[in-house]
């Protein structure tokens, strides 16, 4: 079976991990502070704080803005559950705004309809790596709704850009989980921000609220990244551009070759936007192909040996934990969720495998 993705970890990452293990300094050291500097430079933001995972990154920023009980946070219905989990864990209510039919990202118009007096934040997700253009480029948000904060979910967007600029300048929350375009060895996260108060809060929050070894200023948690994770992350960051370049060539090749397949539609990347192609994502026209998406995914794997990504099979408001309370169905979310697949891409993929995938999909 051709795997859909594979972490690209080699001798450099292994050596980095060994270097830390032999150093005797396993936490709170140079690797973490250097990784923070390097990631801050990479995103061109004022501050960066490494944390233990992406979910904690989101939660810490929400807490930094004192968002909690009685507050509403606007979120997309097509994302990994962690986006709304962070909102609910601080006690706030997720309010779903519809996505665009072509980019699968949330948009200004649907966001504006959802804004109430209780709205405190919007979490745009750069879904599958496709950068979400959000109102911060326009004045309407800051003019009309100055209390509303933007918190970018960049968990899938390492290297994604809008007009040449990295995403994540507005409280970017990053994940370095095992499957991402870059990993810190399985788990990890970061916050990038231009808000010094957010940085200061997060630095304390992730470290038991401490300002020194024995003084706890706020109620915090243990959300630190380890030195070994940071050392692996530094190597992965130095290789990210090259790894993303390979993905881009593959995805663009496949999109071009599959243009003639009427039942597959690639996720639209807007002009001046660059996806890091976390997913090589396509929407399946089930009527045209005569399969359900799940049926297609099984067929590709079991009969053709092609593994695909198939997740977020329902708009998140349908999750059982809401017990049917979220009654509003959003039309584009209903159309897209459950009908999106990710074809293989990444440095593990051989050129002949690319052609095998393309040729066999064309025959369906
Ligand atoms: C969109 C999105 N948000 C948040 C997260 C949470 O990140 P983590 O798994 O590092 O907690 C993930 C992924 O894992 C994600 O894909």
Image (spheres, rainbow, N blue to C red):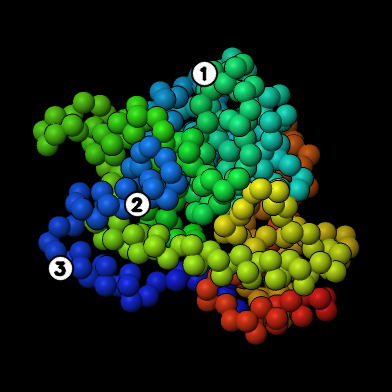
Q: Position of residue 61 (x, y in %)?
A: 41, 33
The answer to whether residue 328 is left or right of residue 277 is right
Q: Secondary structure at mark 1?
A: loop
The answer to whether residue 288 is left or right of residue 330 is right
The residue where tag 3 is placed is 22
Asked if the residue under mark 3 is in contact with the one under mark 1, i.e. CB atoms within 8 Å, the reply is no
Task: Indicate the quadrant containing the N terminus: top left, top right, bottom left or bottom right.
Answer: bottom right
Which residue: 15% across, 57% down?
25
Q: Secondary structure at mark 3?
A: helix
The residue where tag 2 is placed is 38
Number of labels in the image equals 3
Q: Decide: few, some or many residues near mark 3? Use Cα within 10 Å; few <14, some 14-19, many ≥20.
A: few
Residue closer to the observer: 289 or 103:
103
Quadrant of the rendered image containing residue 307: bottom right
Q: Earlier in the sequence, mark 2 or mark 1?
A: 2
Residue 103 vertical placement versus 107 (above, below):
below
Which residue: 27% across, 52% down?
34
Callout in the foreground (3, 2)? 2
Query: Is residue 239 visible to the viewer in this orientation of the structure?
Result: yes
Q: Position of residue 57 (x, y in %)?
A: 40, 41
Spatial separation of the CA atoms under disc 2 and disc 1: 31 Å
Spatial separation of the CA atoms under disc 1 and disc 3: 48 Å
Residue 294 vertical placement versus 91 (above, below):
below
Q: Position of residue 98 (x, y in %)?
A: 71, 36
Q: Secondary structure at mark 2?
A: helix
Image mark for residue 147: 1
Residue 246 vertical placement versus 46 (above, below):
below
């Amino acid at each position: 079976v051709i795997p859909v993705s594979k972490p690209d970890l080699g001798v450099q990452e292994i050596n980095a991990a060994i270097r830390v293990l032999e150093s005797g300094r396993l936490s709170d050291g140079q690797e973490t502070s250097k990784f923070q500097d390097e990631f801050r430079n990479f995103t061109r933001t004022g501050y960066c704080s490494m944390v233990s995972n992406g979910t904690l990154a989101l939660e810490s920023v929400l807490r930094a803005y004192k968002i909690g009980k009685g507050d509403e946070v606007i979120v997309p219905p097509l994302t990994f559950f962690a986006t709304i989990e962070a909102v609910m864990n601080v006690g706030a209510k997720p309010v779903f705004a519809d996505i665009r039919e072509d980019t699968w990202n949330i948009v200004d118009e649907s966001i504006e309809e959802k804004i109430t007096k209780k709205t405190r934040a919007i979490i745009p997700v750069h879904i599958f790596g496709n950068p979400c253009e959000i109102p911060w480029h326009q004045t309407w948000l800051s003019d009309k709704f100055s209390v509303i904060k933007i918190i970018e979910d960049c968990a899938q967007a390492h290297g994604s850009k809008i007009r040449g600029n990295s995403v994540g300048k507005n409280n970017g929350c990053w994940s370095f989980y095992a499957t991402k375009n870059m990993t810190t060895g399985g788990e990890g996260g970061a916050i990038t921000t231009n808000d010094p108060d957010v940085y200061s809060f997060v630095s304390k929050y992730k470290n038991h609220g401490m300002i020194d070894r024995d003084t706890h200023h706020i109620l915090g948690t243990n959300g630190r990244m380890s030195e070994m994770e940071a050392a692996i992350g530094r190597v992965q960051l130095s290789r990210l551009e090259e790894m993303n370049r390979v993905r881009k060539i593959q995805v663009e090749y496949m999109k071009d070759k599959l243009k003639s397949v009427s039942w597959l539609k690639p996720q639209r990347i807007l002009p001046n936007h660059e996806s890091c192609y976390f997913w090589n994502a396509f929407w399946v026209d089930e009527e045209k192909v005569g399969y359900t998406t799940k049926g297609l995914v099984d067929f590709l794997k079991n009969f053709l040996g092609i593994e695909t990504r198939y997740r977020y099979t329902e708009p998140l408001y349908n999750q059982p934990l809401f017990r049917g309370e979220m009654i509003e169905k959003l039309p584009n979310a209903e159309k897209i969720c459950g009908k999106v697949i990710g074809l293989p891409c990444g440095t593990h993929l051989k050129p002949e495998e690319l052609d095998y995938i393309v040729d066999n999909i064309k025959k369906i």
